[in-house]
Image (tube, grey):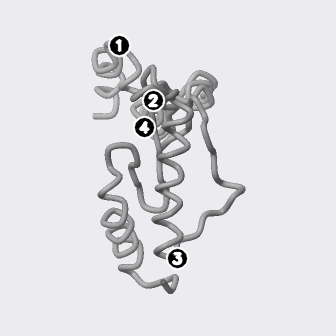
């Protein structure tokens, strides 16, 4: 698909979603990313099941002339980075680099600085118990 067309990302996303819909029990897509997850079952180990899932995903890709950049592929990993967080069979956790960035941010000296910091901190709010209560007094300073 030619680059630069304004509807190219949406069209490509729709194509990929349709192609992998039959595999959605273990393969999720997000634009040009495909996430394959597996569990042990039917007398097979999780790795055996996972290899079967990967084979089916790669067969769909081959049949539809979709290509992967091997340097960007991660196979059989117990944890993967997705949209700025880490996902595993245990759950979702914040990216430690993002947490470090919030902690290392210099003390805001202006409303503009505070707005930037709150924007970054808000990105991680789902990992912080009571975030809304902690952020409310700071947000009030922006009014």
Residue 108, visible in the rendered structure: yes
The residue under the point 28% across, 15% down is: 133
Between residues 105 and 13, which one lies in front from this camera angle?
13
Query: Which residue corresponds to mark 4?
Result: 119
Residue at point 42%, 61% (across, down): 31
Q: Secondary structure at mark 2?
A: helix
Residue, x 60% and y 38% (percent of image)? Answer: 76
Q: Disc 1 or 3, which lies upstream in sequence?
A: 3
Helix, strand or loop under label 1: loop
43 left or right of 69 in image = left
Q: Say if mark 4 contacts mark 2, CB within 8 Å.
A: yes
| Residue 106 appears in the picture as rendered | no
Q: Is residue 56 above or below residue 66?
A: above
The mark tally for this picture is: 4
- In which quadrant is the C terminus drawn? top left
Residue at which label 1 appears:
129
* Residue that badge 3 annotates: 65
* Crowding near the residue tagged with mark 1, few <14, some 14–19, many ≥20 C-alpha atoms within 10 Å: few
Of marks 2 and 3, the one in the foreground: 3
97 lies left or right of 132: right
Label 2 with label 1: CB-CB less than 8 Å: no
User: Considering only order in the chain, which callout, 4 or 1, is on the residue closer to the N terminus?
Assistant: 4
Q: How far apart are labels 1 and 4 at the CA level? A: 17 Å
Q: Secondary structure at mark 4?
A: helix
Q: Residues within 10 Å of mark 4 (few under 14, many from 20)?
A: few
Q: Which mark is residue 66?
A: none
Q: CA distance from mark 1 to mark 3?
A: 46 Å
């Amino acid at each position: 698909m030619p680059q630069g067309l304004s509807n190219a990302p949406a069209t490509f996303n729709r194509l990929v979603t349709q192609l992998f819909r039959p595999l959605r029990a273990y393969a999720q897509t997000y634009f040009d990313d495909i996430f394959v997850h597996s569990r042990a079952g039917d007398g097979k180990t999780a790795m055996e099941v996972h290899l079967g899932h990967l084979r089916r995903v790669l067969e769909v890709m081959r049949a539809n002339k979709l290509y992967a950049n091997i340097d960007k592929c991660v196979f059989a990993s117990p944890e993967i980075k997705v949209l700025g967080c880490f996902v595993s069979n245990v759950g979702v956790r914040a990216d430690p680099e993002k947490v470090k960035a919030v902690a290392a941010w210099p003390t805001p000296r202006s409303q503009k600085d505070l707005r930037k910091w709150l924007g970054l901190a808000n990105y991680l709010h789902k990992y912080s118990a009571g975030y809304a209560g902690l952020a409310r007094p700071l947000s009030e300073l922006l009014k």
